[in-house]
């Protein structure tokens, strides 16, 4: 699934401007990630291998989450070329997204404009939610799934 999402990121035309519609698409994509995780929680509870199912959940939700932000950064750079410390290709946008997600800090690429900083702040907040809340729900579902199996 991660490979399909990555191929879509590179193959889909991303030639529109960064607009309110882009922000709405990013929010909609975030809701899709939440719904995907909720669906996975239900599947984990019914699974014979809840731990493996939770791993599959993260293997689909995290790449989707990251590629949504990479696409948003790429579109923002196309709309306002001085938004970052250097021009972003799709690979650069993905690299920046991974830098923010992994919390290793900014090196060669950093947000310069206010919209870029707001988007980056939004990603940092969403990262904390994904890593804190979503992982907690998945771990709880794994425990409950194992408990149900023991019955």
Image (cartoon, helix red, strand yellow):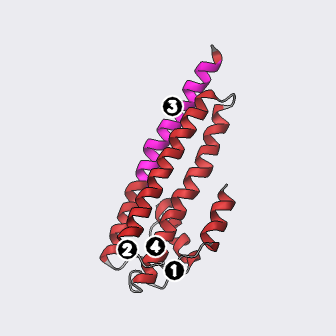
The percent coordinates of residue 30 (x first, y second) are 45, 54
The image shows residue 135, relative to residue 151, as above or below, that is: below
Q: Marks 2 and 3, how far apart in space?
A: 38 Å
Mark 2 or mark 3, which is nearer to you?
A: 2
Residue under label 3, please give it: 140
Q: Marks 4 and 3, how far apart in space?
A: 33 Å
Residue under label 4, please give it: 73
The image shows residue 84, relative to residue 63, as above or below, that is: below
Residue at coordinates 33% horizontally, 68% vertically from top-left? 118
- Crowdedness of circle 1 by 10 Å Cα count: few (<14), some, many (20+)? few
Q: Earlier in the sequence, mark 4 or mark 3?
A: 4
Residue under label 2, please give it: 19
Element type where label 4 sits in the image: helix
Is 99 magenta? The answer is no
- Crowdedness of circle 2 by 10 Å Cα count: few (<14), some, many (20+)? few
Foreground pick, 107 / 2: 2
The percent coordinates of residue 139 (x first, y second) are 53, 35
Quadrant assignment for the N terminus: bottom right
Q: In which quarter of the view is residue 105 placed? A: bottom left
Please say whether residue 107 is visible from this viewpoint. Answer: no
Residue under label 1, please give it: 15
Q: Marks 3 and 1, how far apart in space?
A: 41 Å
**Magenta span of residues:** 127-149
Quadrant assignment for the C terminus: top right
């Amino acid at each position: 699934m991660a490979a399909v999402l990555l191929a879509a990121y590179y193959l889909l035309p991303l030639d529109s401007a960064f607009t309110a519609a882009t922000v709405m698409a990013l929010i909609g994509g975030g809701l899709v990630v939440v719904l995907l995780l909720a669906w996975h929680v239900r599947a984990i509870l019914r699974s014979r291998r809840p731990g493996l199912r939770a791993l599959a959940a993260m293997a689909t939700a995290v790449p989707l989450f990251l590629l949504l932000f990479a696409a948003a950064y790429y579109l923002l750079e196309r709309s306002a070329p001085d938004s970052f410390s250097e021009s972003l290709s799709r690979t650069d946008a993905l690299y920046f997204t991974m830098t923010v997600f992994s919390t290793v800090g900014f090196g060669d690429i950093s947000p310069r404009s206010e919209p870029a900083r707001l988007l980056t702040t939004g990603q940092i907040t969403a990262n904390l939610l994904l890593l804190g809340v979503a992982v907690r729900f998945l771990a709880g579902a794994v425990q409950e799934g194992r408990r149900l199996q023991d019955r």
